[in-house]
Image (spheres, helix red, strand yellow):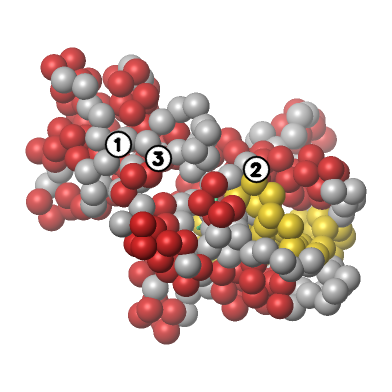
Amino acid sequence: MKEERIEKMNPDCYHIPVMLDECLVGLDIKPDGVYVDLTYGGGGHSREIVKRLSTSGHLYGFDQDLDAMKGAMKDDERFTFVRSNFRYIKNWMQYYGIEKVDGILADLGVSSHHLDEAQRGFSFRYDAPLDMRMNQAGKLSAKDIIAKYTEEQLADILYYYGELKQSRRIASTIVKARQAKDILTTGQLAEVVQPLMGYDREKKDLAKLFQALRIEVNGEMKVLRQMLANATDILAPGGRLVVMTYHSLEDRIVKNHIKGTNKTDNDGTDAQALIFGRPKMSLKQVNKNVTTASAEELTRNPRSRSAKLRIAEKI
Ligand SMILES: C[S@@+](CC[C@H](N)C(=O)[O-])C[C@H]1O[C@@H](n2cnc3c(N)ncnc32)[C@H](O)[C@@H]1O
């Protein structure tokens, strides 16, 4: 068991980087520049960014997960690991005395390590405690949501974050089941909802249900909006923002942010837009449509299938 864990901490097993070349090209790396990888994970992207830096360049790698920190690159003076939620990018850069950065990468969501590590409770492939916190010190777990949210709250997150058509029926089934017996594990939850899921789409629906809970546990949508606003502020003119998403909700937020049409980026934007028209755009799209993984990559990495890459440049 111990050996298995160490094996998974090995960067090659932790996570296979998605669209690696496309991200590197998107960042347009200058050897002396300052870069930020907001989602270090197994460091697949970070290691390749650092290789392209001179001794004057620097990369800051963020991750809120303790496991990512444990496996992070050490002994390279061009790299600093920051164990934090990426929403605080601006505060951390101020802390390090950095005013502007030349490029920021965000490869959103969970890593393969999260899904493979049964005890983290992200996957219905194993029976494990319902956890799903990316930050092990986070206060809210999936177990709390299943135990405490009202039927309506549950239905809403299943509908909005999981895009599950049967959200109301599933929520009502969960509430009935928890009145009879606490739902504490991924296996118990899967067993409760399974009768509602058609034979042919059972795995897909379970994946959507687990995705919805994970997004709620980690506050992913709110954090993404905050991160995009702060990351854009801290980019130098000509600096690149490269964001990879894995579901349509995230992609819509990123797309709207790049086009300058997100409503909650910063105070007053909406009111100004209503009175004076759209505020001045601070980003321009680099790739006109989203970039997706090549056919060759799809044959070796199933995770790449749902990935969408957007690249923007600070004006
Ligand atoms: C898809 S993985 C990144 C994989 C990485 N690019 C690689 O090639 O190994 C996403 C990582 O981002 C981290 N993460 C997700 N949301 C975060 C947030 N709000 N703040 C900090 N880290 C976050 C997760 O813990 C996870 O390790």
What amino acid type should be assigned to the residue bearing mark 2? Answer: Ser
Q: Residue furthest bottom?
A: 296
Q: Assess disc 3: are there few (<14), some (14-19) or many (≥20) residues with their C-alpha within 10 Å of its C-alpha.
A: many
Q: Quadrant of the C terminus?
A: bottom right
Task: Establish whether ligand 1 lies closer than 8 Å to the Cβ of label 2.
Answer: yes
Measuring from the top left, give residue 265's x and y in whole percent.
70, 38
The answer to whether 168 is drawn above or below residue 301 in the figure is: above
The answer to whether 247 is drawn above or below residue 175 in the figure is: below
What residue is shown with label 2?
84
The answer to whether 311 is drawn above or below residue 121 in the figure is: below
Question: Which label number is shown at residue 5?
Answer: none
Q: In the rendered structure, are the residues bearing label 3 and label 1 in contact, judged by CB atoms less than 8 Å apart? A: no
What amino acid type should be assigned to the residue bearing mark 1? Answer: Pro
Q: Residue furthest front?
A: 2
The answer to whether 121 is drawn above or below residue 116 in the figure is: above
In-front residue for pair 242/32: 32
Question: Which secondary structure lies at badge 1?
Answer: loop
What residue is shown with label 1?
129
Question: Which label number is shown at residue 132?
Answer: 3
As measured in the structure, the alpha-carbon distance from the residue carrying label 2 to the one carrying label 3 is 17 Å
Q: Quadrant of the N terminus?
A: bottom left
Residue 270 appears in the picture as rendered = yes
Question: Which secondary structure lies at badge 2?
Answer: loop
Q: Is residue 219 left or right of residue 237?
A: left
